[in-house]
Image: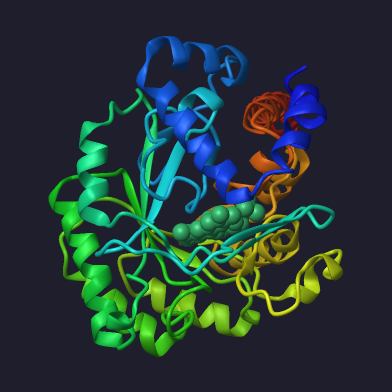
Amino acid sequence: MMKWLYQQVLKRFLFLLNPELVHSLFVGIGSFFGKTKVGRGLVSQFYRYKGKPIQLKVDGITYTSPVMLAAGFDYNGKLAGVLDTVSFGGDEIGSVTARPTKGNPKPRLRRMIKSQSLIVYKGLKNDGVEVIIERLKKTKKPKNFIWGISIAKTNDDKTVTTEAGIEDYCYSFRRLNEEGMGNFYTINISCPNVHGGESFTTPALLKPLLVALDKIPCEKPVYLKMPINLVWEDFQELLVIADQHRVSGVVIGNLNKNYDEATYIDEAPKNYRGGLSGLTCQKRSTDIIRKTKAAWGNRFTIIGCGGILSVEDAMDKLDAGADILQLITGMIFEGPHLMKSICEAYAQRMEDRENNTQQALPEAQLS
Ligand SMILES: Cc1cc2nc3c(=O)[nH]c(=O)nc-3n(C[C@H](O)[C@H](O)[C@H](O)COP(=O)(O)O)c2cc1C
């Protein structure tokens, strides 16, 4: 019913409007609903998973749902008090930067409807770490809901040198830790839309960044948001560096920079800048997840992200080796019921596994 309503009515209307306007509308409505018991109850009624418990523990953190909102949708932390009602287990807030960032010139967001992708050219627009810390302090954190905070470097010409860029990351990381804000941190080294490009996705630059971050006291898991356009050998080199530092895991991954991989390339306007989300990320991210799991086993927690547009896509990511999931574009193209459907499928998957183990036991005892 909710799926039909979204796809046949609401989505048709929303997709006629400017995507950035729709985003602002959703954030406004969401944060309003999040502040009242009635609002939260109403959303929960339709969108909250209420089946048998599906808790999962990742790096000591207990999640009540295997799917989180990926970084970039709630970049100012305004939805941090409501997303549990739509079956998210956590919110990766941000990316936040040391100083407020205005973002790139508009247009910053565009839909490629047939390709099930968004062209994202936000340029890390956000209110800055201090304002976001204060906002989160005033937000009632939902019970058993996880706040991850994604940190990037301020997108302006003051941070183009390596030293200034590192200091910028360190400032936000230090402040968040000092304030005890968030359950985990993700260092976004791979935003494709910033001054100077993806500056920390080479071993030579990632190394000093991680050395500097290691010096800041932190008791919480630290993850790296990885690029998906590197060849495996280069990706692997970044993991080798990560392995030498306080990195618990990797989010695989960020936007796809290769427009040729969109299903309908003609949907992309000429000379448009930005990375592609959704279906255009799907295969690349799942392949890299599989390779990372095969090469590194359990060394890195893997947060699977990129092109989860259906329950099957979510299960594919888990089968490839992801420990937990994140999404944005699926929620926009498929609808806000997607997260609940993923929870239901996850519960079924758990049940099937339990049954299989029980069936396998007597056989194992016989042999
Ligand atoms: C509107 C938008 C803004 C984004 N901004 C960020 C960001 O600030 N930081 C970040 O690490 N990733 C950002 N991303 C990338 C997403 O976190 C995610 O990696 C990517 O969209 C693939 O997931 P999806 O296919 O489920 O959307 C953004 C994505 C979108 C769609």
Tell me which residue sits at (59%, 70%) in the image: 295
Could you tell whether 3 is left or right of 39 in the image? right
* Residue 298 appearing in the image: no
Q: Nearer the viewer, residue 315 or 179?
A: 179
* Residue 80 appearing in the image: yes
Tell me which residue sits at (74%, 38%) in the image: 334
Vertical side of 259 occupied by 124: above or below: above
Query: How many dots with numbers?
Result: 0
Could you tell whether 3 is left or right of 323 in the image? right
Could you tell whether 347 is left or right of 180 in the image? right
Q: Nearer the viewer, residue 122 or 81?
A: 122
Residue 136 in picture, x, y percent from top left: 26, 39
Tell me which residue sits at (41%, 80%) in the image: 200
Image quadrant holding the C terminus, namely top right
Image quadrant holding the N terminus, namely top right
Vertical side of 367 occupied by 149: above or below: below
Residue 328 in picture, x, y percent from top left: 59, 47
Residue 208 in picture, x, y percent from top left: 29, 83
Residue 259 in picture, x, y percent from top left: 74, 74
Tell me which residue sits at (75%, 40%) in the image: 310
Q: Quadrant of ligand 1?
A: bottom right
Could you tell whether 232 is left or right of 149 in the image? right
